[in-house]
């Protein structure tokens, strides 16, 4: 009986963990590949970048991550249309939050600070 309760507890913990980190696999892979690219594609960054996206997933919902990371990616592009990513105050706040979460994840996982 105790053994069944143990396994049931593990299953519930895994389910709760999966719900807390609702990032799809492809989203995680994209982050890791981009992160590795920014670090010269070195194999050692596979683990560090994987760690970083796991840390980010603990702090942000996937939809918030997508929106904020896209804002950060496109806000420095020139042109009038890119003002949609630069100008709105709510997007600026989302970008600041994302960059803070990303920096904290990088530090926790041994990644060098991003140069932006």
Image (cartoon, helix red, strand yellow):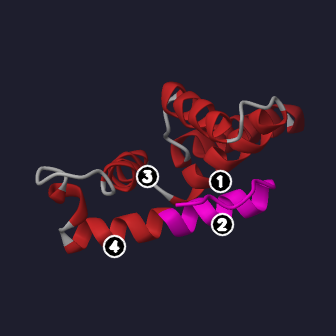
- Which-is-in-front pick, marks 1 and 2? 2
**Callout 3: 10 Å neighbours few (<14), some, many (20+)?**
some
Mark 1 / mark 4, whichever is N-terminal: 1
Residue at the farthest top position: 26
Res. 55 mark: 1
Q: Which residue is mark 4?
A: 93
Which residue: 59% across, 45% down? 16
Q: Earlier in the sequence, mark 4 or mark 2?
A: 4
Question: Looking at the rendering, which quadrant does residue 38 occupy?
Answer: top right
Tell me the element at label 4. helix
Residue tagged by mark 2? 104
Q: Which residues are magenta?
A: 99-116
Element carrying mark 2: helix
Please state which of the two labelled residues, at mark 1 or mark 4, is closer to the viewer. 4
Judged from the image, the secondary structure of the residue bearing numbered disc 1 is helix
Residue 74: x %, y % from top left: 32, 49
> Rounded to the nearest whole Å, what is the CA distance between mark 1 and mark 3?
12 Å
Q: Main secondary structure of the magenta part?
A: helix
Q: Residue at x 74, y 63 (%)?
A: 107
Q: Residue furthest left?
A: 80
Q: Residue 26 has which mark? A: none
Disc 3: which residue:
61
In the picture provided, is 69 more to the left or to the right than 56?
left
Give how far apart the Cα atoms at labels 4 and 2 are: 17 Å
- Measured in 3D between alpha carbons, the distance from the residue under mark 1 to the one under mark 2, in whole angstroms, is 8 Å
SS class, disc 3: loop
Q: Specify which label sits upstream in the sequence, 1 or 3.
A: 1
């Amino acid at each position: 009986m105790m053994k069944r309760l143990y396994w049931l507890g593990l299953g519930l913990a895994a389910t709760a963990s999966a719900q807390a980190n609702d990032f799809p696999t492809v989203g995680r892979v994209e982050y890791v590949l981009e992160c590795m690219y920014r670090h010269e594609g070195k194999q050692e960054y596979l683990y560090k970048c994987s760690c970083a996206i796991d840390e980010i997933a603990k702090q942000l919902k996937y939809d918030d991550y997508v929106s904020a990371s896209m804002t950060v990616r496109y806000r420095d592009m020139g042109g009038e249309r890119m003002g949609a990513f630069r100008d709105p105050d709510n997007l600026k706040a989302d970008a600041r939050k994302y960059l803070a979460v990303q920096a904290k994840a990088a530090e926790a996982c041994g990644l060098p600070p991003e140069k932006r």
